[in-house]
Amino acid sequence: MTVKINYRGKEYDANTGSTLRDAVKKIGLQPETVLAVVDGKLVTDDTIIREGMQIRLVAVISGGAA
């Protein structure tokens, strides 16, 4: 079974039973560059994907003056 991951207006499929980290890598992103939000709550990348999850990735932004 698969669930959808939303990132910047696009949807990607992720297999249930895998970790969010593995799913992020599979769609070609570096896990350190995104935060995962599941059902409106921030979760860690070792979270196991389960059927019915609504997953959204948010880009991590850093920077500023030195």
Image (spheres, rainbow, N blue to C red):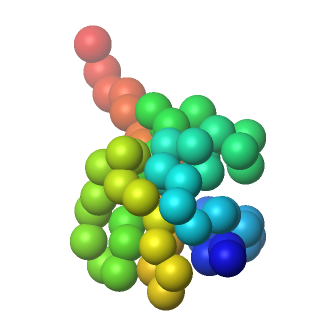
Drawn side of residue 43 relative to residue 36, left or right: left
Drawn side of residue 66 relative to residue 60, left or right: left
- Name the residue at the bottom extreme: 52
Is residue 54 shown to the viewer in this render? no
Rendered image quadrant of residue 30? top right
Query: Taking 19 as reference, is 31 above or below it?
Result: above
Of the pair 63 and 44, the residue shown nearer to us: 44
Residue 62 position in % (x across, y down): 38, 33
Who's the residue at 57% across and 43% down the image? 22
Who's the residue at 51% across and 37% down the image? 31
Rendered image quadrant of residue 36? bottom left
Of the pair 30 and 22, the residue shown nearer to us: 22
Is residue 23 shown to the viewer in this render? yes
Number of residue marks:
0
- Name the residue at the top extreme: 66
Of the pair 12 and 3, the residue shown nearer to us: 3
Query: Taking 53 as reference, is 62 above or below it?
Result: above
Residue 6 position in % (x across, y down): 61, 71
Who's the residue at 57% across and 67% down the image? 16
Of the pair 38 and 52, the residue shown nearer to us: 52
Who's the residue at 37% across and 66% down the image? 37
Residue 19 position in % (x across, y down): 48, 50
The image quadrant where one finds the C terminus is top left
The image quadrant where one finds the N terminus is bottom right
Query: Taking 49 as reference, is 47 above or below it?
Result: above
